[in-house]
Structures are given as C-alpha cells and as structure tokens.
Image: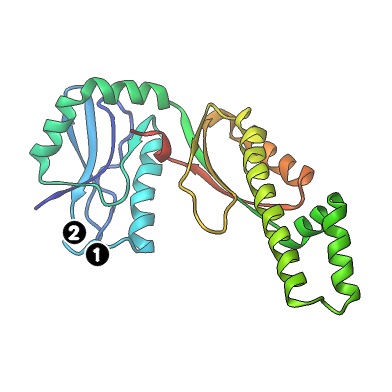
Amino acid sequence: MSTYVYGIARGSHPSLPEQMGGVGNPPQLVRTIRTGELTALVSEAPEDLRPKRRELLAHQSVLAEAGEGGAVLPMRFGSISADDEAVRTVLGEREKHYLERLDALDNKVEYNVKASHDEEAVLHQILAEDSELRALNETNRAAGGGTYEQKLRLGERVVAAMQQRERRDGELVRQALEGAAGGVSPGPDSTGWLANVSFLVDRDHCAPFVEAVEALCKEQPHLVLQVNGPLPPYSFVE
C-alpha cells in the first residue's frame, strides 16, 4: 500500500504524534519513518482520498500536534509516496536541504491574510477624491440616471478607479504587516481578493502580528481582512 506523508521533522523532535488518527475513513494511524537525522510523519494512504473538509482537518491536525514540539516541514494535502522505502530514499537524498529548512522554520508559524474592499465605502472615497468623476455622477443622477452612453462612461471610470485602488491597497496590506513578520510569501491571485499574502511569524510574536492586523483594520476601515492562523508554514516550504 502507498504511504501518505504529513510532514518531515528532525529525528530528535521531542513529541511526534504516533498512534493518532490521520486521513482516511476510518482514520489511518499516524506513525514515523526514521532515516539519518530526519523523521517523516506518515500513515497508510487511503485509496479513495478526496480533499473533503474532514480529511483536510485531519491532515492539519497531525501537523499542528507535531508543530507544538518543534519545527516540522509540512507537506501539502495529498502528498503520497509509493511506499515506505521511497520515503526513506527521499529523506536520505535530501537530508541536508531538509535540515536547512527546518533550521530556517524553527519556532515559526504562518498567518495567511486575504483582503477585499467594502465596495460602498471605497466608492464613497473615490467620488470624494475625484472631482471629475463626482461631477459626472452628479450629472447622471440629475438626469434620472443619464443616457446609456453616460452610464457606460461612468461605469468604466468607476471600474478603472476601483482597480487602481485594489492595486494600491494590496501593496498597502503587505507593507503594513511585513514589519511584524519574518518573511512574506504572496499567494496565487484569486477572484474576490485584492491581496492574498502569507506571513512567516515567530511563534513567540503572534500577538504583535495580530495587533498589527487589528491596527490596519482601524486605520483603513474600507478594507475587509480575513486572517487564518497560526498555521504550519506551508507557504515557506520548497
């Protein structure tokens, strides 16, 4: 049977969660594979594994439990090797690299921050700052909404202004929070978010990072921030 890999830790890690339930239905028992100075957290890989909520949470729970005792390189959900021997081979071949990454991520966690706009608040700001756009809007309103061409022109101007604000505010979010973090990793662009950024934070400095997020929310009330963390540092593992 193939082997499901949750993460990689030092062989000297004090508390790896063996015998806890991992992915699968029923949950597969978590165990360890030791090679040289490294240990992999693994279980049997279910044949019908799907990225359902229960499975994703099971994967994350194993990593969270392991991370409490020391640095762990988290594998992404669905990381499957042919068998235990294949895992041992990779640990042996990449031992130096994995040990270097464990040193870099020791006592670190990840916070992912996604940002969007309160569109009504941003529209008010845009109209307040752009006198020409404000005059065009007022002219259309006075004309009962304006002609089709006038509405189209206004809409195009508003969309352009909103996109410009999204770019500006996306950079603002990164700059406002990177000072409270030890590393920054931009996430993939996705519809609905003007920023999707992961921050590497020292485990002992989570409170100041959260305070920085709260301060940003107060200073920029037109921003809607979604914060997920602390997490295993997925975005900082090669």
Crowding around mark 1 (Cα neighbors within 10 Å: few <14, some 14 to 19, many 20+) is few
Residue drawn at point x = 60 percent, y = 50 percent: 194
Q: Earlier in the sequence, mark 2 or mark 1?
A: 1
Marker disc for residue 193: none
Q: Is residue 104 left or right of residue 88?
A: right
Q: Is residue 198 left or right of residue 137?
A: left
Residue drawn at point x = 67 percent, y = 48 percent: 164
The way the protein has been coloured in the rendering is rainbow
Marker disc for residue 25: 1
Look at mark 2 in the image and give the residue it sits on. 46
Residue 218 screen position, x and y as percent: 78, 45
The Cα–Cα distance between marks 2 and 1, rounded to whole angstroms, is 8 Å
Q: The residue under label 2 is which amino acid type?
A: Pro
Crowding around mark 2 (Cα neighbors within 10 Å: few <14, some 14 to 19, many 20+) is some
Residue 211 screen position, x and y as percent: 69, 38
Q: In the image, which is nearer the foreground, mark 2 or mark 1?
A: 2
The quarter of the picture where residue 99 lies is: top left
Q: The residue under label 1 is which amino acid type?
A: Asn
The quarter of the picture where residue 56 lies is: bottom left
Decide which of 132, 38 is in the foreground and name it. 132
The answer to whether the residue labelled 2 contacts the one labelled 1, judged by CB atoms less than 8 Å apart, is: yes
Residue 91 screen position, x and y as percent: 18, 29
